[in-house]
Amino acid sequence: MKPLAEAQRQVLATVGRLPPGRVPVWSSVGLVLADDVIATQDVPPFPNSAMDGYAVKGADVAAVPTVLRVLEDVAAGHVGTATVEPGTAVKIMTGAPIPPGADTIVKVEDTEPGDGAVRIMAVTEPGTSVREAGGDVRSGDLVFDTGTRLTPAHLGVLAAIGVAEPTVFRRPRVAVMSTGDEVLAPESPRLAPGQIRDANRPLLTGLLSELGAEVHDYGIVVDDATLLRSTLLRAAEECDVVMTSGGVSMGEYDLVKAVLTELGDIELWRVAMQPAKPFAFGQIRSTPLFGLPGNPVSVLVAFEQFARPALLSMMGSRLLFRPRLRGVLAHDVHTDPEKTVFLRMNVTEQDGRWVAASAGGQSSNVLSAAANANGFAVVPVGTGSVDEGSVVELEMFRWSETRTYEDVLG
Ligand code: AMP
Ligand code: MG
């Protein structure tokens, strides 16, 4: 059996990087910067008010109450004409430019309006509530590095500094197909004896969509060598990555295996892991191919351990692997000591520590339990049994909401 880390290294050494291109900032979330972003403008672009209130000279509000003459009102998006002189103020809204002569904003709550004047009720330190130009981003700053995977907040910053089309690595086009005579479309209302519905394409489509890949659906390919060959070749031609499921296990009628190995530079592996031990990987005409196992939980685990880091690498990301925590087991577990075992767990925080409990059946066909899991307990090679209360590594593949309305709001 091939050690997991060796298999992961081999996959990552094979996949290249997708070409960069410019993408509207609107649709760049999840994509990765192919260039350093250097600001050519300040954010904010001009000094402005952090509060609704009055722009004044700090020296005028060192002792209160005091009355200042109001010269004009300035709203956000407008520029006033007045200069603040001793004894005067400009009424100002949040985001409006600081008028010449002013150095301090007194917030409206600390004032009382008068006729053409304002009474200042609170001593306000000079400089209060003034946002300096460049206080967020300064022109010339290296804002984000190459290899940064864009989050919504990154998009906002890019927009603010005028980068409307960041240069990012292209979204990978991923071909997805299921194999097997027994597999029917998910829409099939009835199953004949021996048939099952295709769980793997919807599963993979979801995983790939979450990652920001472009999914190309090649459907279900029955166990027919000619059809499989032509579909694989077409997919390798049209896409950046090909992903199949099924047909790579040991006792399998070896049609998928035979076609895969004959078509390209593809190896059949037995990785020292559970689930997802049988796994085919290689290239068809320089397009990486992931020959995932048939069982849906194996598909999930093989995707997480091989395809996801590889796709992130192709997308240019520096960060490839999911976060891990250390937590304690809620019960004993018994695993094969010759394999790295990925148990599907419910990980919760209890009294300040992470606790992992099995999410249900741990067989590789029981996707329903995996669907309710948020993390893997990773039991390394050479371990075998682990007792309740022992510390294990938890790889979190789903950080989602954990608190209800009642939990938070009563
Ligand atoms: P295989 O490796 O092709 O022998 O498949 C292993 C197991 O996974 C078998 O029980 C298959 O019926 C099942 N399987 C294969 N493909 C799918 C699929 N697309 N959806 C659900 N189960 C599948
Ligand atoms: Mg099959």
Image (cartoon, rainbow, N blue to C red):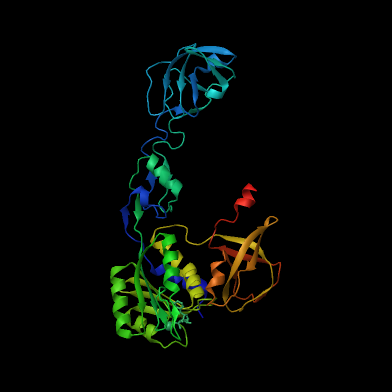
Q: Toward the viewer: 98 or 146?
A: 98
Q: Which residue is at 50% across, 76% downward?
A: 276
Q: Toward the viewer: 156 or 52?
A: 52
**In the figure, is residue 384 to the left or right of 210?**
right
Residue 258 on image: x %, y %: 37, 85
Image vertical order of residue 176 relative to residue 213, above or below? below
Q: Toward the viewer: 368 or 229?
A: 368
**In the figure, is residue 141 to the left or right of 387?**
left
Image vertical order of residue 131 relative to residue 275, above or below? above
Residue 396 on image: x %, y %: 56, 62
Q: Indicate which quadrant contains ligand 2.
A: bottom left
Q: Give residue 217's quadrant in the image.
A: bottom left
Q: Which residue is at 37% across, 23% downward?
A: 79
Q: Which residue is at 34% across, 83% downward?
A: 259
Q: Which residue is at 37% across, 18% downward?
A: 81
Image vertical order of residue 45 relative to residue 20, above or below? above
Residue 96 on image: x %, y %: 42, 27
Q: Toward the viewer: 232 or 264?
A: 232
